[in-house]
Amino acid sequence: MSLLMSTSVSLASEPITLKQVTSGEFAAEGVSGINPIKGTDQYARVSADGKRVEQYSFKTGKLTSVLFDVDHTQGEQIKGFDGYVMSPDGTRMLIATKREKVYRRSYKAVFYIYTIKSRKLEKLSDGGPQQCPVWSPDGLQVAFVRDNNIFLVKLLYDNAESQVTKDGKFNEIINGIPDWVNEEEFEFNTALTFNADGTMLCWLKYDEKNVGQYSLQLYKGSHPAHDDYSVYPGVYSYKYPKAGQDNSRMSAWSYDIKSHRTQKLQVPLDADGYMPRIMPTPNADKVLVYTMPRHQDVLNLYAVNPRSTVAHLLLKESVAKYVKEETMVNLKIGDNYILVPSDRDGYNHIYVYNHNGQLLRKVAPGNYDITDVYGMDEATGDIYYQAALNPHDRQVYVAHKNGKTERLTRQEGWNSAVFSGDFKYFLNSWSDYNTPYVYTTRSNNGNVIATNVDNKKLKEKIARFGWVKKEPFSFTTSEGVKLDGWMVKPADFNASRKYPVIMFQYSGPGNQQVVNSWSAGSMGQGGAYDMYLAQQGFIVVCVDGRGTGGRGAEFEKCTYQKLGALESKDQVETALYLGTLPYVDKANIGIWGWSFGGFCTLMSMSEGRPVFKAGVAVAPPTSWRYYDTVYTERYMRTPQENPTGYDDCPISRAPKLNGALLICHGSADDNVHPQNTFEYSEALVQADKDFKENIYTNRNHSIYGGNTRNHLLRQITQWFMEHLK
């Protein structure tokens, strides 16, 4: 009787469709694009209809000013815009239009200069689209990149434009923006800055002439269609340094705006070293240039005089194995301080330095990771940050100058913050496994002032569609390693039955999928796709194995120089553990993943223990010899130094593949090249292994456009329906 009642309840719910999942129908409402205005309790953001840039008060949450309205400008007229860049003094902004994506973080656009008081809108340049425009500190100059060269526009001279560099050339020399691998793996898109008084322009130069070139073949395709390739395919060729091969040679430069003198900055760097950032400081005689050796186990910060070109080492961050990329992303430079995140003591903490490189204090010592750095209120010395005292939980904290630490958020789950420019208020985003995001405005002691977004309608909607709760669990492997996961069961779950299981994972270094957050789930939207699979009668499981984040450096870095070996063992151990549960059909367990998750899927299916009946690998790296230098060598060193580590890969394991395999890849994937899938499929053919392969025309690493994502998820679903039920 109870089983019948449970079934009738689930049948009363509306079924989820793949179209709903891929159209974003279950996306949560959010508060995004917030740009705090320095020194105030105000912030700017794009309006909900995308037509205005509005100014709000953190304190009240109310609109205080309309800074830009696309329908009310003087001078130039535009129909819409794609973003904005506020000037440091708050009097002007750059308005981006006709945005055209280049790589993951880079884009070209036609920018306009907008003066807020007069509402005057004028083109930044008539010479063609621009990249990464940057304001001078006084808001009277703009530098930008076009065709790998740097240009300068002076607003006080009727927007006079001059060309700063002339040696830029596609696939040879890049000025002011990173090359593909630096952009992708060091997570930035601008390598250009003014000094503090706006008299000097400084940038990084990438000489990529000796870097190997990769060519992607492009076809007519659809959504969008490329009519130029309707008969003969086209080719996009770009520089992509693969593990162990030549990188760009890097250097730092300065340009005296008054004298037009260009000089190379004397920053010490190995011939094959990296410069992951160039940053301004409050001192006009100093810019900061970051450097790393190829092994990425040291981060140097050099203070460089842009006029004399002399550099001196400000501080040196040296850690075992590798410096995490989050160190550069979360490193904060203030008027009188530098905040450096570091796991030098085994966990990620914050180290506070002055501008002379003197260590002042360590923030929040303890056996847990600080996971985000919001900054320091220089008036009080208070430092605000996010930390994971529980690996799956995030809370917001303040560390006072006297050493006292306070927790500002109380609700278990995932908390993040955006602080006002004066650090008096913050916007808190909270969610957990089963609750969509709730945004609240809070004072800097954590007290709630107002609720901005509660996603009440989405909560009602998912209830209508019969969503079930994600259930966290833990187990210990045969090697004595405690692993954590979550599980989604069908709504009509009956413990006396046995269910097929689909395991989803990513498993990459430092990543976490087992997080008490609405973001947990295989395709976002609170795990809408996982809920869909559960409605088809599957149990969906996700477990973070060794190498993932939130549990300190030892757990995260134990996969060093052997990517895939421990991660795949832990997924196999997960399947073995699940097979002991009375309601799991251990003969029908599948696994899938995307990118690193696809790699780990292949490694797990060929680990040697035949626990997986079926698997799907989407856009998988299949040999780290085919992947880029920065990412791969951070964890593996070079193939020349570590041949054994590189030799253990899906291609070499092909003869041991067990289970029905579907591989999916985009033919224009600039990140994980289709070469990976082509070479792996050849290895499977020669090993006499059956498999299915789907290639998505002209699609990149994200595999989307038109009906593409819907088709992809249907293939994954049908594969598991066919082989696990």
Image (cartoon, grey):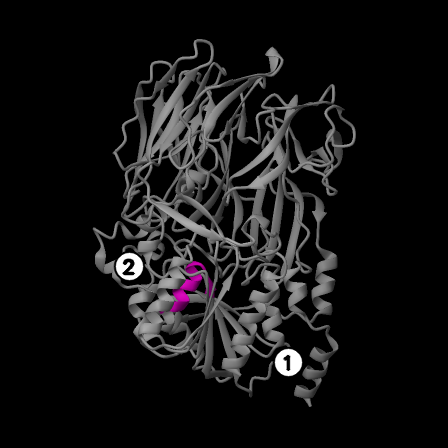
- Residue 699: x and y in percent read 53, 55
* Residue 374 among those drawn in magenta: no
Q: Are marks 2 and 1 in contact (CB under 8 Å)?
A: no
Judged by its main secondary structure, the magenta piece is helix
Amino acid at circle 1: Asp
Q: Is residue 705 above or below residue 91?
A: below
For the image, the number of numbered tags is 2
User: In the structure shown, which secondary structural element does the residue marked by tag 1 occupy?
Assistant: loop
Report crowding for label 1: few under 14, some 14 to 19, many 20 or more residues within 10 A (C-alpha).
many
User: Is 698 situated above or below 152?
Assistant: below
Residue that label 1 marks: 492
Task: Left or right? Give the position of 638 relative to 418.
Answer: left
Query: Residue 353: x, y in percent?
Result: 38, 29
Looking at the image, residue 292 lies above or below residue 201: below
Examine the structure image and report whether residue 598 is included in the region drawn in magenta: yes
* x, y percent for residue 286: 40, 20
Q: Nearer the viewer, residue 100 or 183?
A: 100
In the displayed image of the protein, which residue is found farthest to the bottom?
Answer: 1
Residue type at numbered disc 2: Lys
Q: CA distance from mark 2 to mark 1?
A: 42 Å
Quadrant of the drawing holding the N terminus: bottom right
Q: Which mark is residue 562?
A: 2
**Residue 681 sits in which quadrant?**
bottom left
Which of the numbered marks, if any, corresponds to residue 39?
none
Direction from residue 393 to residue 548 in the image, left or right: left
Check the image and name the residue furthest to the top: 259
Horizontal side of 577 relative to 558 (left or right) equals right
Instruction: Tell me if mark 2 has few (under 14), some (14-19) or many (20+) residues whose alpha carbon lies within 10 angstroms of its own.
Output: some
Q: Which residues are magenta?
A: 593-603
Q: Nearer the viewer, mark 2 or mark 1?
A: 2
Report if residue 476 is visible in the image. Answer: no
Residue furthest front as drawn:
231
